[in-house]
Image (cartoon, rainbow, N blue to C red):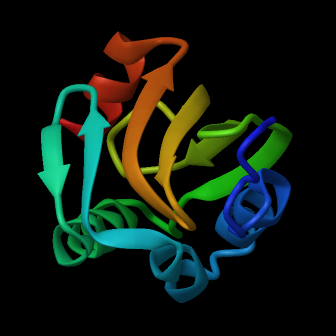
Amino acid sequence: MTTPIPPRPAARTLGEAMAAGRWPEVLDSVHDDVVAHVPATGTIAGTDALAGFLLETAAKTDDGETFELIDAMEGETHAALYFRITATREGRKPLDNLTVHLARFDGAKIAEIWFHNFDNAAVAEFWA
C-alpha cells in the first residue's frame, strides 16, 4: 500500500507562478523555515531571507529576471523545475542561465531547495 501524496502545488503550477513573477504565491508554497542552497551565495534560511534574496537579485538587474519554464517534473517528495533565466545588468555580459531548481517537500510545503546552474562560473560573474 502506498502513502498518498499530500496536496501541494503541482510542479508545473509552481514553475508557471515563478515565470509569471507571482512571488507571493511562490512564497506561500514554502515552509517558514525553508532552506535554499544557492551556488556562490550559500545557504538562505527562512521565508523572509528567501524573499529578500529574490528582491535583491531583481534590484541588481536592469529590468528584473525573466524565467522561462522549460519543463517540470515531480515525484512523491521532490519536484524539479527546469528554467532558462535571463537578465541584463549594466557593465556585465547578459545572463542566460539554464538551471534546475530541485525542491524537497515536507507535506504540502517546500522545505528545501537546491539551485543547479549549467554554468556556475558565468552566473557567479553576472551577480558579483
Height in image: 35 above or below 47?
above
- The residue drawn where x is 55% and y is 13% is 118
Q: Quadrant of the C terminus?
A: top left
Residue 115: image location, x then y, percent:
43, 32
Residue at 55% x, 58% y: name it.
65
* Position of residue 24 in the picture relative to residue 6 (left or right): left
**Quadrant location of residue 71?**
top right
Q: Quarter-wise, where is residue 124 in the image?
A: top left
State the image coordinates of residue 51 (x, y, percent, origin top left). 30, 74
The answer to whether residue 117 is above or below residue 48 is above
**Which residue lies at the image location 26% right of the left edge and 73% below the top edge?**
47
Left or right of 38? Residue 113 is right
Residue 53 image position (x, y, % from top left): 25, 63
Examine the rendering and report whether any part of residue 96 can be seen. no
Viewer can see residue 90: yes
Question: Residue at left 76%, top 53%?
Answer: 4
Residue 125 screen position, x and y as percent: 28, 25
Q: Which of 66 and 110 is in front in this view?
A: 110
Number of marks in picture: 0
